[in-house]
Amino acid sequence: EDKVVQSPLSLVVHEGDTVTLNCSYEVTNFRSLLWYKQEKKAPTFLFMLTSSGIEKKSGRLSSILDKKELSSILNITATQTGDSAIYLCAVVEGNEKLTFGTGTRLTIIP
Amino acid sequence: NAGVTQTPKFQVLKTGQSMTLQCAQDMNHEYMSWYRQDPGMGLRLIHYSVGAGITDQGEVPNGYNVSRSTTEDFPLRLLSAAPSQTSVYFCASSYVGQVGNSPLHFGNGTRLTVT
């Protein structure tokens, strides 16, 4: 059975800290991995990763894929209260099936 | 520019009742999918479709039916609601072949409570 697992499930840090969120996967025919941020409503897209070892960056957020280890990390530096959210990773397979992970709930304390 | 439209936004059902959650998109997306999200959890795939007349099961299909008679619409049916189906339901769409290459377009969700 295909699996996407994120860790930790929950994380509480102080404003200004750096956090690393993990996503590991076991799928049959990997095509890409996506990261999303979810606040009140629907998830919003952050990154798409298809190639191993290439870092994607957007401001204080960055992400990298390791196809050998079947995993990805999402880093957030100099965290702000607006970073408080659920962070979701999702894996896309060749048959277009997109499976989300369990999510990491990140809380930033001012 | 409607995007993905889900109706209703909120619904309360009694155990055993049936209902259909509606999802429509106006972007000519072949790929459409339904997810449920329980409190504090990630999204779990219920059913998905890569085009009209084609549907497939996700991780948690039991208790739900879908059909895809048009490109625009992908309704989700609960035949006999159970309290375990209390959740927030999201519909999402994309172009086939683009599901992994571009972000999914999400609806705003339907909050369903089964008592």
Image (cartoon, helix red, strand yellow):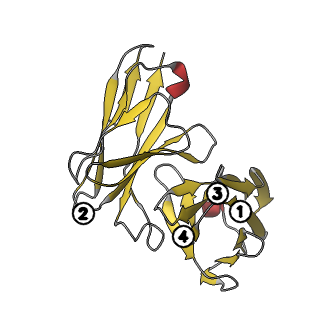
Q: Secondary structure at mark 1?
A: strand
Q: Place residue B16 in its image quadrant.
A: top left
| A65 lies left or right of B75 | right
Determine whether the residue tagged by mark 4 lies in a helix, strand or loop. strand
- Marks 1 & 2 on one chain: no
Quarter holding residue B96: bottom left
Q: Nearer the viewer, residue B23 or B8?
A: B23
> Which residue position holds label 3?
A84
Could you say whether the residue bearing mark 3 is in a helix, strand or loop? loop
On screen, residue A32 above or below B6: below
Chain of the residue on which disc 3 is drawn:
A
Residue of label 1: A23
Viewer-closest of B77 and A83: B77
Amino acid carrying mark 1 in the image: Cys
Q: Nearer the viewer, residue A44 or B89?
A: B89
Callout 4: chain: A
Q: CA distance from mark 1 to mark 3?
A: 18 Å
Label tally: 4
- Residue shown at the point (54%, 70%) measured from the top left: A46
| Both marks 3 and 2 on one chain | no
In the picture, the disc for residue B55 is none
Residue B54 percent location from the top left of the image: 32, 50
Q: Which residue position holds label 2?
A: B27
Gap between marks 4 and 3 measured at Cα: 14 Å
Residue B74 point in image, percent of width and height: 30, 45
Q: Chain of mark 1?
A: A
